Image (cartoon, coloured by chain):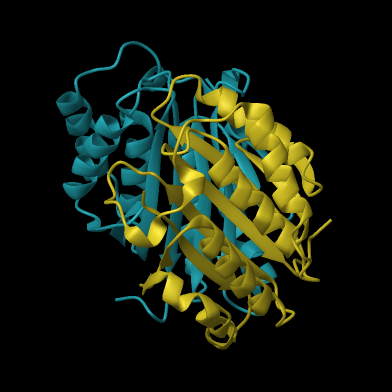
Chain colours: A cyan, B yellow
Amino acid sequence: MFSGAQISLYPMTDDFVAVITKALGALDPYRERLRIETDDLSTLLVGTPDVVFAAMRDLFVAAAASGKHCVLHATISRGCPGEPDDPMCQTPELTGPMAPLAERKAKALATVASAPLSGQATSAQLSLYTLGIDQHMDEIYGCIDFLKSSGVFSRSKNFCTKLSGDAAAVFATVGEALVRFGPPAGHVTIDLTVSANSPSAH
Amino acid sequence: MFSGAQISLYPMTDDFVAVITKALGALDPYRERLRIETDDLSTLLVGTPDVVFAAMRDLFVAAAASGKHCVLHATISRGCPGEPDDPMCQTPELTGPMAPLAERKAKALATVASAPLSGQATSAQLSLYTLGIDQHMDEIYGCIDFLKSSGVFSRSKNFCTKLSGDAAAVFATVGEALVRFGPPAGHVTIDLTVSANSPSAH
């Protein structure tokens, strides 16, 4: 298994470099459990989904605490056949046979319900893609059902689902979407956008 | 067929609202051929891929002309089984049988070679997903081969491919990736990030 994300942080301010630099300290508790590489477009986080999502959450909450309009985008992937297995990504969640959809939804909802809150309000949208399988829409619709009952569902949009709520609940929900839908060892990706402090939020 | 994109524009400046508002005029020549809907996270463009990509290109070039660091993100989709057919999206490119890979690559390269330049330098990265088919990596690798010979290839990254070059060539290349790979009537999506004026560009 290989899993991780290419993440980018966009603070809409003249001081964007300072906001990003200050927020990067939020990654420190995770650095030993992640491989991190940065270029001018994004930062790669390689690790298990729980660590990757916790790191993204804390980075985003730290940036949003600036009060500036901030957006995080992440291209998230697990199980891509073109990536090598990496010991840093091993997790029992992503092995073994695929449990029935109802059981997976229940586990996902329990995890989201137990996430402590961050105090940071957010809007978000995600697209989940389950690759290399027929009937991929069954898994996508199953995921959308879970999102609708997650407590942070906002509305369905063309090409994506919109969420809104506390940053911790939103990141926990998207993390569960990644690991619970599609075969455990399969190739699943998410295109995620999270926003805070937007002047046009409604 | 239903095709389009959810696009977001991120100018990294205190004046981000003014940069976005001014750039929106670039969409005017396309408004009759697009359905457009906006919320606080993104703007939906529904139309044929050629029109959607031309509109994204002109919007991004207009925003980047501000000289500010600007990023455009797009969640692009065609043929999603969950979306209704839309007459606004009909195009002969996305019907009929799938031509041999070599023929599709040649058509894509010819289109990119004929794109007039915009004068705006960019970096970009994209992930292409072909859904609902077995052997999806064959199409993805075919697309990566095309990207490598497109003239704007920069490097392979985990989860995505990085491009750099003139904005017009970059958007033309990504547009060809969308329509030439995966079955013509199939479900294909792209997660696209385009950046200009980054202080950390290299």
Q: For this view, does B190 lie left or right of residue B120?
A: left
Res B75 seen here = yes
Given residues A162 and B57, the one toward you in this image is B57
Identify the residue at the far top of this view.
A96
Name the residue at 43% across, 21% down: A186
Residue visible at 39% across and 44% down in the picture = B79
Query: Relative to residue B188, is residue A83 drawn left or right?
Result: right
Tell me: A110 left or right of B167.
Answer: left
How many marks can you see?
Answer: 0
For the C terminus of chain A, the image quarter is bottom left
- Foreground pick, B105 / B91: B91
Residue name at image x 43 percent, y 18 percent: A185
Q: Which one is nearer the viewer's eye here, B141 or A115?
A: B141
List x then y, in percent, for residue A116.
Answer: 29, 49
> Can you give x and y, in whole percent of width and height, for residue A110 in the image?
20, 36
Query: Which residue of the protein is positioned furthest toward the right in this rendering?
Result: B202
Q: In this view, does A128 lie above or below A101?
A: below
Q: Position of residue A6 (x, y in %)?
A: 59, 44
Instruction: Let me know if residue A29 appears in the view.
Output: no
The x, y position of residue B161, in whole percent, is 68, 41
Classify residue B190 as left or right of residue A102: right
Q: Relative to the observer, which residue lies in front, B89 or A134?
A: B89
- B148 up-or-down from B31: above or below: above
